[in-house]
């Protein structure tokens, strides 16, 4: 482990910028989100997780898939430097692993010949992720329900702890270790630093909610598909896309063609299962016409279907959906409500 | 709010309504949450305070929801702006007034989350306390006091109808004094800027939109079964979050709510990126007032501005 003085961070970031396009938590309008930075001074260190998730970096809200004109078809290529992301929390680094299962990593897919998404891969495959410890989890954080932890390193190439006057770096992946070796201006971390990290970790964990065993959630959800509980859960939802758009793990998209005459492009855009037109078919029929059905879809995907496909839940407990929901439909309460629910259906019929 | 609880218990007991939509305590310090009260026991959960931001009347018209499907007579707790939405629905033939029982409540204004987070520079507020004219915000390592006025919605600061003008029952004492010297101050000041400055501001603001449609979906006036942004056969407008596309969405939406927006501020509160939506909606409201002498949701017998025609209306925008 190595360390640099906090006041020297700009040198480190400058070094990083030489080889990478660097994204970090920074001011975007009145909110804080991951954005491409040109200097360390843009980074916001004083927050825990950003208002918007970092999925935008690898899976932009709108992305051109190809363009066409008289000159033929043009598929975008990436000629830029690879991406490095600074300041990702465990709930976000874990979300990248989930998204990579969907878009990128065929080895983790049930069928190895499954489609690999070139648009994702050209950004994600050679990226460098700086995970960062959360010294101060928010009241909406519940990563500990989903195998996360404010000091967990999973999904990071380099793990960073902010110890007030220093940043301590630990190489996690081979890629991360190799990068740290290249940086010559750091000191070795000492025993005192390790003690400090242990202390910070303890404090951070004390801010988290009581751990909830979410393992039974999968089975429970398999049994309640047609239970009236969904009416109760969904009654107040107004079916906006806020929760899904801020979520680091939601990844549904729509494809839209924009063209005029012989020129045009195909774009893919974030979509949300909360929207009424999400499942509307060409005939006009909509299998998820009701708000209840859409809310059920969102939760089933997160805590049931994704498990079927990829053997884990599609939620990292980042709490962003809790923060933004205009009607305070709190997913933590929904999880508890489902776990506590007594199935009314008679199993025999 | 014992009076509120008692009244709701009474109308449920008398079977005046099948359900009462009101607010209950939410899971975050600044968020009350909509609740659907069907029993006297559940009525105990009702609250009313500065955290009750939502305009609950939005549940009355949203198509294909359980609430409009299952219940015949709906009771609803309304602030001033919310009661105006019910007037709007009535004049627009969306509901039958006699099917809704309105429990009016005097409102001193509701909190604006984005103002709160700006005051503490994005830090997390874990608790608050109201001390007469002030609010004390408490976080893990801070405590700061601000005048209550600084954290109320802009809509509340210029509200002229805090006492639910349309109601069947009224709880508490009306706030008699409503003193709004200039409801359009912000709009007028903005209007004095050069067109370049205004355009720059509008572009900067509307480029933040992530097209989540929370503003539309919470809005009581946005009840079209199929919104123009959802038309995809063929697609009517661009769907990217680029400012050129977003601005079209907002411009059209503002035309659709012209003379229909009750300035409840629900859209502003719902927006996850704190976009200044009111800069457009309030301007449209002002235009409607000046041109047609019409204010949405006030007179339950008056035809809506956009559904009536009068010979001496100003037409300078057509004839130049
Ligand atoms: S569902 Fe909510 S808590 Fe879970 S990852 Fe998405 S935004 Fe975070
Ligand atoms: S959910 Fe956990 S990992 Fe994410 S910000 Fe909160 S404490 Fe950190
Ligand atoms: S943010 Fe809340 S209201 Fe909007 S779709 Fe999600 S759960 Fe429903
Ligand atoms: S546009 Fe906004 S302020 Fe106007 S009625 Fe709709 S939600 Fe309320
Ligand atoms: S709520 Fe905000 S971000 Fe969402 S569509 Fe409306 S203006 Fe855009």
Image: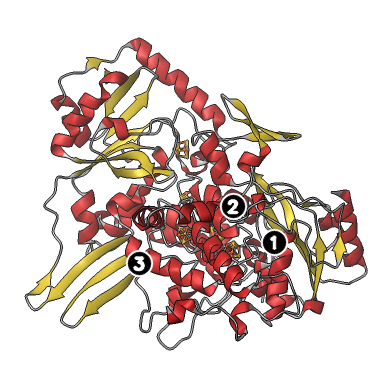
Q: Which quadrant of the structure image shows residue B55?
A: bottom right
Q: Which quadrant of the structure image shows residue A63?
A: bottom left
Q: Which of label 2 and label 3 is nearer to you?
A: 3
Q: Which residue is mark 1?
A: B81
Give yes or no for contact between labels 3 and 1 (Cβ–Cβ under 8 Å).
no
Do discs 3 and 1 belong to a common subunit? yes
- The answer to whether residue A94 is left or right of residue A125 is right
Q: Residue at x 45, y 66 (%)?
A: B250
**Mark toward the start of the polypeptide (3 vs 1):** 1
Q: Quadrant of the C terminus of chain A?
A: bottom right
Q: Is mark 1 within 8 Å of ligand 4?
A: yes
Q: Secondary structure at mark 3?
A: helix
Is disc 1 surrounded by few (<14), some (14 to 19) or many (20+) residues within 10 Å?
many
Q: Secondary structure at mark 1?
A: helix
Q: Is residue A280 visible?
A: no
Q: Is residue A135 above or below residue B10?
A: above
Relative image position of residue B59 (x, y in whole percent): 66, 68
Relative image position of residue A319 (x, y in whole percent): 51, 45
Q: Quadrant of the N terminus of chain A?
A: top left
Residue at the left extreme, as displayed = A71
Q: Observer-nearest residue: A151 or B41?
A: B41
Relative image position of residue B20 (x, y in whole percent): 79, 65
Residue at the bottom extreme, as displayed = A283
- The answer to whether residue B223 is left or right of residue B45 is left
Q: Observer-nearest residue: B176 or A79?
A: B176
Q: CA distance from mark 3 to mark 1?
A: 30 Å
Q: Which residue is mark 3?
A: B245
Q: Which residue is mark 2?
A: A335
């Amino acid at each position: 482990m190595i360390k640099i003085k906090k006041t020297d961070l700009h040198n480190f970031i400058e070094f990083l910028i030489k080889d990478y396009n660097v994204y970090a938590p920074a001011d975007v309008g009145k909110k804080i989100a991951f954005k491409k930075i040109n200097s360390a001074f843009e980074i916001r260190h004083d927050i825990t997780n950003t208002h918007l998730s970092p999925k935008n970096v690898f899976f932009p809200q709108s992305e051109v898939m190809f363009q066409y004109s008289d000159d033929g078809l043009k598929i975008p290529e990436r000629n830029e430097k690879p991406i490095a992301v600074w300041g990702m929390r465990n709930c976000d680094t874990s979300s990248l692993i989930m998204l990579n299962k969907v878009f990128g990593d065929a080895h983790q897919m049930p069928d190895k010949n499954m489609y690999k998404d070139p648009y994702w891969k050209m950004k994600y495959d050679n990226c460098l992720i700086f995970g960062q410890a959360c010294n101060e989890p928010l009241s909406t954080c519940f990563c500990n329900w989903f195998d996360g932890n404010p000091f967990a390193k999973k999904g990071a190439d380099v793990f960073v702890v902010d110890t007030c006057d220093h940043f301590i770096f630990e190489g996690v992946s081979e890629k991360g270790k190799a990068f740290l070796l290249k940086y010559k201006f750091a000191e070795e971390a000492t025993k005192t630093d390790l003690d400090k990290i242990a202390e910070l970790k303890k404090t951070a964990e004390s801010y988290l909610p009581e751990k909830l065993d979410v393992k039974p959630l999968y089975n429970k959800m398999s049994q309640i598909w047609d239970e009236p509980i969904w009416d109760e859960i969904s009654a107040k939802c107004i079916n906006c896309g806020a929760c899904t758009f801020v979520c680091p793990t939601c990844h549904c998209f729509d494809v839209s063609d924009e063209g005029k005459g012989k020129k045009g492009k195909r774009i893919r855009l974030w979509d949300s299962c909360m929207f009424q037109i999400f499942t509307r078919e060409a005939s006009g029929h909509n299998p998820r016409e009701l708000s209840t059905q859409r809310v059920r879809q969102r939760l089933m995907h997160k805590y049931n279907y994704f498990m079927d496909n990829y053997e884990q839940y599609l939620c990292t407990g980042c709490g962003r959906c809790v923060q933004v929901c205009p009607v305070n439909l709190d997913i933590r309460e929904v999880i508890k409500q489902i776990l506590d629910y007594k199935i009314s259906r008679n199993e025999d019929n | 709010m014992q009076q509120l609880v008692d009244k709701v218990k009474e109308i449920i007991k008398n079977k005046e309504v099948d359900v009462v939509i009101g607010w209950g305590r939410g899971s975050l310090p600044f968020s009350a949450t909509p609740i659907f009260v069907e029993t006297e026991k559940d009525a105990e959960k009702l609250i009313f305070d500065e955290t009750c931001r939502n305009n609950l009347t939005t549940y009355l018209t949203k198509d294909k929801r359980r609430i409009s499907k299952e219940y015949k007579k709906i009771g609803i707790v309304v602030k001033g702006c919310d009661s105006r939405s019910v007037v709007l629905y009535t004049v627009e033939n969306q509901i039958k007034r006699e099917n809704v029982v309105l429990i009016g409540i005097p409102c001193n204004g509701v909190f604006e989350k984005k103002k709160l987070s700006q005051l503490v520079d994005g830090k997390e507020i874990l608790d608050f306390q109201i001390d007469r004219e002030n609010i004390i915000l408490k976080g893990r390592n801070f405590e700061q006091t601000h005048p209550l006025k600084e954290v109320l919605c802009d809509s509340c600061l210029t509200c002229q109808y805090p006492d639910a003008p349309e109601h069947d029952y009224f709880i508490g004492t009306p706030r008699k004094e409503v003193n709004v010297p200039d409801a359009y101050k912000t709009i007028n000041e903005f209007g004095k800027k050069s067109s370049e400055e205004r355009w720059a501001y509008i572009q900067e603001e509307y480029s933040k939109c992530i097209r989540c449609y929370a503003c539309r979906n919470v809005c009581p006036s946005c009840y079209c079964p199929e919104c123009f942004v959802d038309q995809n056969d063929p697609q009517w407008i661009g769907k990217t979050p680029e400012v050129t596309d977003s601005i079209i969405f907002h411009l059209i939406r503002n035309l659709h709510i012209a003379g229909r927006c009750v300035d409840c501020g629900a859209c502003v509160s719902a927006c996850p990126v704190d976009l200044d939506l009111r800069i457009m909606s309030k301007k449209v409201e002002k235009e409607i007032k000046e041109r047609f002498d019409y204010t949405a949701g006030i007179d339950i017998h008056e035809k809506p501005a956009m559904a009536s025609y009068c010979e001496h209306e100003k037409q300078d925008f057509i004839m130049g």
